[in-house]
């Protein structure tokens, strides 16, 4: 491929600026930070964790009682579904974290 026209490109002229009036000037908002929302979120997270811990402990006690009484009969298909679901979640997390 041969280039025949090799004229140079001229400089760029600055655009003419228009004077801004006070009414047309953009108003800048000042930044602000509040930790109130973070404190509320942390309190909510602690409450949820406490509730999960109680319900988990109650569920474990229920299962333990059923095992001791000889009445515990877990569903094989439900256990398999939970194992596969947990494996899928682990795989997705590892992929997201690059591990």
Image (tube, rainbow, N blue to C red):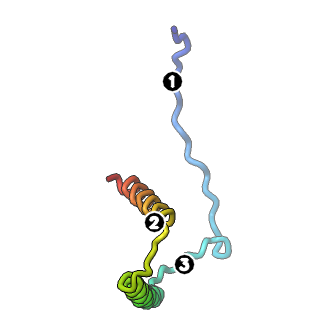
Tell me the crowding category of disc 2: few under 14, some 14 to 19, or many 20 or more residues within 10 angstroms, Cα based: few
For residue 68, above or below residue 84: below
Residue, x 46% and y 61% (percent of image)? 80
| Disc with the residue nearer the chain's start (1 vs 2) | 1
Q: Are marks 2 and 3 in contact (CB under 8 Å)?
A: no
Mark pair 2, 3: CA separation: 56 Å
Mark pair 3, 1: CA separation: 45 Å
Q: Quadrant of residue 43?
A: bottom left
Residue, x 38% and y 81% (percent of image)? 67
* Between marks 3 and 1 in the image, the one whose residue lies nearer the viewer: 3
Residue, x 56% and y 42% (percent of image)? 13
Q: Which residue is mark 2?
A: 79
Question: Is residue 75 visible in the rendered structure shown here?
Answer: yes
Q: Quadrant of residue 49?
A: bottom left
Residue, x 40% and y 55% (percent of image)? 91
Tell me the crowding category of disc 1: few under 14, some 14 to 19, or many 20 or more residues within 10 angstroms, Cα based: few
| Tally of numbered tags | 3
Q: Are marks 1 and 2 in contact (CB under 8 Å)?
A: no
Disc ID at residue 8 = 1
Image position, residue 73 (x, y; %): 45, 74
Image position, residue 20 (x, y; %): 63, 67
For residue 10, above or below residue 52: above
Q: Which residue is mark 3?
A: 29
* Between marks 2 and 3 in the image, the one whose residue lies nearer the viewer: 2
55 and 90: which is toward the camera = 55
For residue 78, above or below residue 28: above
Image position, residue 97 (x, y; %): 36, 57
Tell me the crowding category of disc 3: few under 14, some 14 to 19, or many 20 or more residues within 10 angstroms, Cα based: few
| Disc with the residue nearer the chain's start (3 vs 1) | 1
Q: Are marks 3 and 1 in contact (CB under 8 Å)?
A: no
């Amino acid at each position: 491929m041969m280039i025949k026209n090799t004229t140079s490109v001229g400089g760029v002229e600055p655009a003419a600026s228009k004077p801004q009036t006070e009414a047309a000037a953009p108003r800048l908002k000042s930044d602000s930070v509040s930790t109130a929302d973070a404190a509320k979120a942390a309190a909510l997270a602690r409450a949820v964790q406490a509730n999960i811990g109680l319900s988990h402990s109650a569920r474990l006690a229920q299962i333990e009682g059923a095992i001791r009484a000889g009445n515990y009969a877990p569903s094989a298909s439900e256990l398999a579904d939970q194992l596969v679901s947990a494996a899928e979640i682990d795989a997705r997390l590892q992929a997201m974290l690059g591990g």
